[in-house]
């Protein structure tokens, strides 16, 4: 029995809770055309995810002069850009689990990255209903291209969790030039493939092919680039675009990002060619903040890095376009989170939201279309091992086990330099109680994760700033959060 047969058989068991709601989760064959019954009025949904991208490393943010991201920037120019876009975890796998379920991933124990030795049963828990599953039930074709990082065993495979088609790798990191073998081989469906093209280009190619084959729609496409995650491997074609960058780490990052931007451009051009721009909602965001000293990314003016609940670890580039529906060039300051994509896509697609569990995401369309200026969330929460945080309005409380709580006013102190807990003790206590009540709803972590992310949690923003400037100049000091393998 091959891997595909094993995956299909186990997916029946894996989707039992979902099938009880009336949805069959048996994947279609690779390359299947969409069913004729799909309603043309339903918009296509494309979610493009960058990996380890810094808050400042998109041209549209206006914070770094050396980046070249005209295609990603065009999403903001043609639609909306969120200045307060967040993710629910400062590392890869939990953030993806939250996006795929529309729920704080701590509700089902997916609090940590896997490791250091991957548990046999690691993966997005099988009782969780995913966005591609609800979109399939609503009549959508579904596909994923790129980095999965939600489990490598057959029942956790993307084609067992709602995706009709898959091209990518299952682990947390991968070479950009070698296909690999075993559980982290490059796969087409469940079968290993020998890819000759630079992986970022190959992922873009597969996304474009999928759109071309499913232009009659509706389709849901999740394009999860592993760029700009380490290892820093890039072709001369992209390096040649940055001849004046002296820091080799920063130059590699800029080149890798440029390859990703080219891919985003290919996707957008394919939508235009097929006359799909006015029937396709495109989201773009990063899975966490940049590990500045690990890959040369920058989170300016935020403090902290990937792996930390300071703003630099959880506030990310976040934008969306839907030509003819969303206003062009609109900048929104209301806090939003990647959990909101689930509710937004499901509502637009006429999908039924799971009714047997707490759903944390909110439909962003009223805000993006200018029908309301209300904040979608009264509070946003984070728990990552001993790191805890809550944002309520413009106030943010940061809690680390064994250390005093710190309170910041992000409207005046974006870099989290000035603790005002002594000035506003009632607010500090109020936010602490809100966080404690939320935490009582959560499950303990299903696996331990990597302890390195829980080190070096200093609030010395000036020191963080010095460290980031050293990294920008090619310095070699490394923070624990930069030494990631996932």
Image (spheres, grey):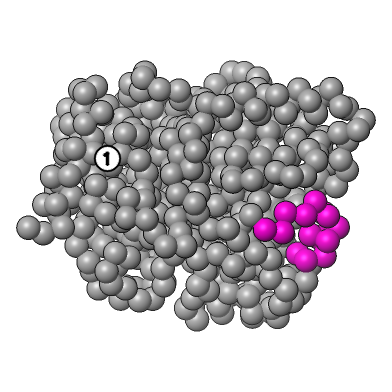
* Residue 154 seen: yes
* Residue 389 sits in quarter: top right
Name the residue: 32% across, 65% down.
Answer: 184
Side of 67 relative to 179 (left or right) = right
* Residue 297 seen: no
Tell me the element at label 1: loop
- Towards the viewer: 42 or 357: 357
From this view, report whether residue 53 is shown above or below residue 198: above
Name the residue: 27% across, 54% down.
Answer: 153
Side of 9 relative to 178 (left or right) = left
* Residue 186 sits in quarter: bottom left
Name the residue: 41% across, 68% down.
Answer: 174
Name the residue: 26% across, 29% down.
Answer: 18
What quarter of the picture does the N terminus occupy?
Answer: bottom left
From this view, report whether residue 179 is shown above or below residue 464: below
- Towards the viewer: 64 or 275: 64
- Towards the viewer: 416 or 347: 416
**Where does the magenta region start and end?**
455-468
From this view, report whether residue 197 is shown above or below residue 315: below
Residue 464 falls inside the magenta stretch:
yes
Percent of width and height locating residue 98: 47, 39
Percent of width and height locating residue 144: 32, 49
* Residue 179 sits in quarter: bottom left
The residue to which callout 1 is attached is: 162
Residue that protrudes farthest toward the left in the picture: 1
From this view, report whether residue 372 is shown above or below residue 171: above
Number of residue marks: 1
Percent of width and height locating residue 145: 34, 54
Percent of width and height locating residue 202: 35, 65
Side of 250 relative to 200 (left or right) = right
Residue that protrudes farthest toward the right in the picture: 423
């Amino acid at each position: 029995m091959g891997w595909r047969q094993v995956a299909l058989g186990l997916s029946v068991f894996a989707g039992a809770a979902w099938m009880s709601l009336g949805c069959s989760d048996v994947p279609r064959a690779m390359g299947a055309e969409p069913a004729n019954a799909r309603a043309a009025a339903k918009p296509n949904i494309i979610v493009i995810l960058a990996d380890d991208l810094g808050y400042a490393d998109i041209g549209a943010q206006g914070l770094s002069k050396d980046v070249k991201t005209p295609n990603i920037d065009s999403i903001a120019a043609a639609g909306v850009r969120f200045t307060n876009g967040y993710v629910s975890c400062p590392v890869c796998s939990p953030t993806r689990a939250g996006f795929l379920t529309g729920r704080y991933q701590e509700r089902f124990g997916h609090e940590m990255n896997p490791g250091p030795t991957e548990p046999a049963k690691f993966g997005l828990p099988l009782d969780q209903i995913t966005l591609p599953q609800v979109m399939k039930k609503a009549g959508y074709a579904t596909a994923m291209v790129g980095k999965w990082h939600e489990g490598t065993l057959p029942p956790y495979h993307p084609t067992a969790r709602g995706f009709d088609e898959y091209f990518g790798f299952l682990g947390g990191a991968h070479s950009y030039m070698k296909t690999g073998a075993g559980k982290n081989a490059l796969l087409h469906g469940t079968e290993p493939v020998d890819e000759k093209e630079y992986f970022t280009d190959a992922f873009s190619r597969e996304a474009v092919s999928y759109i071309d084959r499913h232009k009659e729609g509706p389709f849901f496409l999740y394009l999860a680039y592993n760029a700009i995650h380490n290892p820093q491997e890039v072709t001369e074609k992209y390096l040649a675009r940055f001849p004046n960058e002296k820091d080799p780490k920063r130059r590699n990052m800029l080149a890798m990002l440029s390859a990703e931007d080219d891919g985003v451009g290919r996707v957008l051009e394919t939508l235009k060619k097929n006359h799909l721009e006015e029937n396709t909602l495109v989201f773009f965001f990063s899975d966490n903040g940049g590990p500045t000293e690990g890959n040369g990314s920058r989170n300016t003016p935020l403090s902290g890095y990937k792996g930390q609940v300071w703003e630099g670890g959880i506030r990310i580039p976040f934008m969306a376009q839907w030509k003819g529906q969303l206003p062009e060039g609109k900048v929104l300051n209301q806090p939003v989170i990647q959990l909101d994509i689930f509710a937004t896509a499901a509502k637009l697609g006429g999908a039924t939201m799971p009714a047997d569990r707490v759903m944390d995401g909110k439909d962003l369309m009223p805000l993006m279309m200018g029908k309301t200026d209300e904040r979608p969330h009264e509070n946003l929460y984070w728990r990552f091992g001993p790191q805890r945080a809550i944002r309520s309005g413009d106030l943010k409380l940061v809690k680390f086990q064994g250390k005093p709580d710190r309170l910041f006013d992000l409207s005046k102190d974006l870099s989290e330099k000035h603790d005002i807990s002594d000035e506003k003790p009632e607010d500090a206590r109020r936010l602490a109680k809100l966080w404690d009540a939320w935490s009582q709803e959560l499950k303990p972590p299903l696996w331990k994760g990597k302890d390195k992310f829980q080190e070096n949690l200093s609030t010395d923003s000036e020191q963080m700033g010095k460290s980031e400037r050293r990294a920008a100049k090619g310095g070699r000091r490394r923070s624990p959060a930069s030494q990631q393998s996932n």
